[in-house]
Amino acid sequence: MNLTCRHLPGATLIAVAGEIDTTTSTHLEDYIDQQRERLDQHLIIDMSELSFLDSSGLAVLLAAAALARAHGVGVHLAGLRPMPARLLEITGARRAVTVYDHVEQAIAAVEALNLVNPSERA
């Protein structure tokens, strides 16, 4: 699994490549925790290069979504491939996140949300 991060106004963008399974899910969780500058910023996850996602990875995403929701923001997944998309669909987890076809769409949506709901972000 390869992880990269970009900080945007009001959001953290994490790109995930490879596979998320029981051997890598804790690394993803730690990476998300380390890279988020603020809990009241949206989290965008670019999954366009993610080929496999198991239940442990799904649990990490759902925990991140619950934390984001508690702080008034959301988790936005972009570029889902068929296998991870199917897992989110059959488990009902798709209701906990917002899904976009492309990362650019997710970024634009978060920018629009930040304009509609501005806060005292530093």
Image (spheres, rainbow, N blue to C red):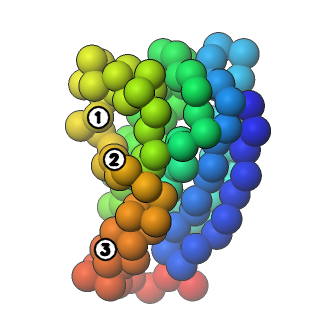
User: Residue 116: x percent and y percent?
Assistant: 26, 82
Q: Are marks 3 and 2 in contact (CB under 8 Å)?
A: no
Measured in 3D between alpha carbons, the distance from the residue under mark 1 to the one under mark 2, in whole angstroms, is: 8 Å
Which quadrant of the structure image shows residue 5? bottom right
Residue 67 visible somewhere in the drawing:
no
Disc 1 or 2, which lies upstream in sequence?
A: 1
On screen, residue 89 versus residue 51, left or right, reads left
* Residue shown at 31% from the left, 49% from the top: 98
Q: Nearer the viewer, residue 38 or 50?
A: 50
Element type at mark 1: helix
Q: Are marks 1 and 2 in contact (CB under 8 Å)?
A: yes
Please, what is the three-letter code of the amino acid marked with disc 2?
Val
Residue 97 visible somewhere in the drawing:
yes
* Residue shown at 33% from the left, 47% from the top: 99
* Residue shown at 27% from the left, 17% from the top: 90
Q: Tag on residue 94?
A: 1
Please, what is the three-letter code of the amino acid marked with disc 3?
Leu
User: Residue 29: x percent and y percent?
Assistant: 63, 36
Disc 1 or 3, which lies upstream in sequence?
A: 1
Disc 3 or 2, which lies upstream in sequence?
A: 2
Q: The C terminus is located in which quarter?
A: bottom right
Q: Which residue is mark 3?
A: 113
Q: Which residue is mark 2?
A: 99
Please, what is the three-letter code of the amino acid marked with disc 1?
Arg
